[in-house]
Amino acid sequence: MAADIAKKYPQAAINLTPSSGGRFEVLRDGVPVFRKSWEKRHAKPGEILALLAEIDMEK
């Protein structure tokens, strides 16, 4: 997933932070885009890129 984000957003700074307890979060500029704890599931293929694109369209 990080590679897909880096390919679509080459200027992005991507930080992978290990955690425990099955935690998975994606933040953009410190704002949550996806949190497994909110959705109660893993992200679907392409879902994170779609959410990031949605944010781009809002700007």
Image (cartoon, rainbow, N blue to C red):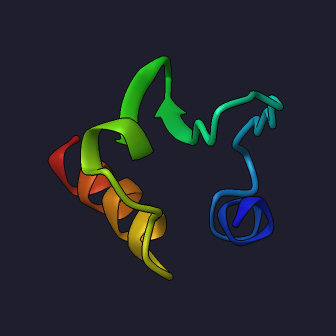
User: At x 64% / y 58%, what residue is drawn?
Assistant: 9
Q: Position of residue 15 (x, y in %)?
A: 79, 33
Farthest residue, direction front: 21
Res. 41 image quadrant: bottom left
Farthest residue, direction bottom: 45
Seen in the picture, residue 18 relative to 31 is either above or below; the reply is: below
Res. 12 image quadrant: top right
Horizontal side of residue 43 vs 12, given as left or right:
left
Q: Position of residue 14 (x, y in %)?
A: 76, 39
How many discs mark residues in the rendered view? 0
In which quadrant is the N terminus drawn?
bottom right
User: At x 27% / y 39%, what residue is drawn?
Assistant: 38
Q: Position of residue 21 (x, y in %)?
A: 65, 33
Horizontal side of residue 29 vs 8, given as left or right:
left
User: At x 73% / y 29%, what residue is drawn?
Assistant: 20
Res. 47 image quadrant: bottom left
Farthest residue, direction left: 58
Horizontal side of residue 21 vs 32, given as left or right:
right
Query: Which of 54 and 41 lies nearest the eye of the viewer?
Result: 41
Q: Position of residue 53 (x, y in %)?
A: 35, 62
Seen in the picture, residue 26 relative to 30 is either above or below; the reply is: below
Seen in the picture, residue 48 relative to 29 is either above or below; the reply is: below
Query: Which of 38 and 55 lies nearest the eye of the viewer?
Result: 38
In which quadrant is the C terminus drawn?
top left
Query: Which of 53 and 1 lies nearest the eye of the viewer?
Result: 1
User: At x 48% / y 17%, what residue is drawn?
Assistant: 30
